[in-house]
Image (cartoon, helix red, strand yellow):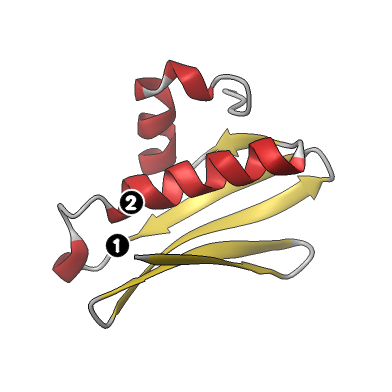
């Protein structure tokens, strides 16, 4: 599965492409040190294949490399962050 990042400066999205389908996790940039993950969309054809989890992990790894925090407003990202205590270094709960 290929995951890419599209950054518009004020936000962007992580995109996963698999088997001709596209899933995404969108974010808004609050400042240089904080992004808000606000939406995750995985088409039915990709459900149960770990695509959403892969997008979430990619965002966490990107935050670690970039030195910023993630505020998970998206219900999926929030649920994943609560399951992964090891993401606490980059996930900022409200």
Q: Position of residue 43 (x, y in %)?
A: 24, 68
Left/right placement of residue 54 relative to residue 87 reads left
Left/right placement of residue 69 relative to residue 37 reads right
Between 63 and 44, the one nearer to me in the picture: 63
Name the image quarter holding the N terminus.
bottom left
Residue found 44% across the figure and 28% down from its top: 81
Q: Are marks 1 and 2 in contact (CB under 8 Å)?
A: yes
- Checking the image for residue 42, the label placed there is 1
Residue found 36% across the figure and 42% down from its top: 76
Note whether 63 is above or below 40 in the view shown: above
Residue for badge 2: 52
- Looking at this view, name the residue that lies furthest to the right: 32
- Checking the image for residue 51, the label placed there is none
Res 70 quadrant in image: top right
Q: Position of residue 91 (x, y in %)?
A: 58, 28
Left/right placement of residue 49 relative to residue 77 reads left
Name the image quarter holding the C terminus.
top right
Res 69 quadrant in image: top right
Between 58 and 76, the one nearer to me in the picture: 58
- Looking at this view, name the residue that lies furthest to the bottom: 20
Q: Secondary structure at mark 2?
A: helix
Residue found 48% across the figure and 19% down from its top: 86
Mark 2 burial class by Cα count in 10 Å: few <14, some 14-19, many 20+ = many
Q: Position of residue 3 (x, y in %)?
A: 46, 64
Q: Earlier in the sequence, mark 1 or mark 2?
A: 1
Note whether 5 is above or below 35 in the view shown: below
Residue found 84% across the figure and 45% down from its top: 32
Note whether 93 is above or below 1 in the view shown: above
Between 27 and 3, the one nearer to me in the picture: 3
């Amino acid at each position: 599965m290929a995951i890419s990042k599209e950054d518009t400066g004020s936000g962007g999205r992580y995109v996963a492409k698999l088997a001709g389908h596209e899933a995404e996790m969108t974010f808004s940039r609050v400042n240089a040190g904080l992004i808000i993950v606000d939406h995750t969309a995985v088409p039915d054809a990709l459900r149960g294949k770990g695509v959403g989890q892969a997008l979430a992990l990619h965002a966490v790894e990107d935050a670690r490399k970039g030195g910023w925090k993630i505020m998970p407003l998206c219900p999926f990202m929030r649920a994943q962050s609560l399951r992964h205590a090891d993401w606490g270094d980059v996930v900022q709960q409200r």
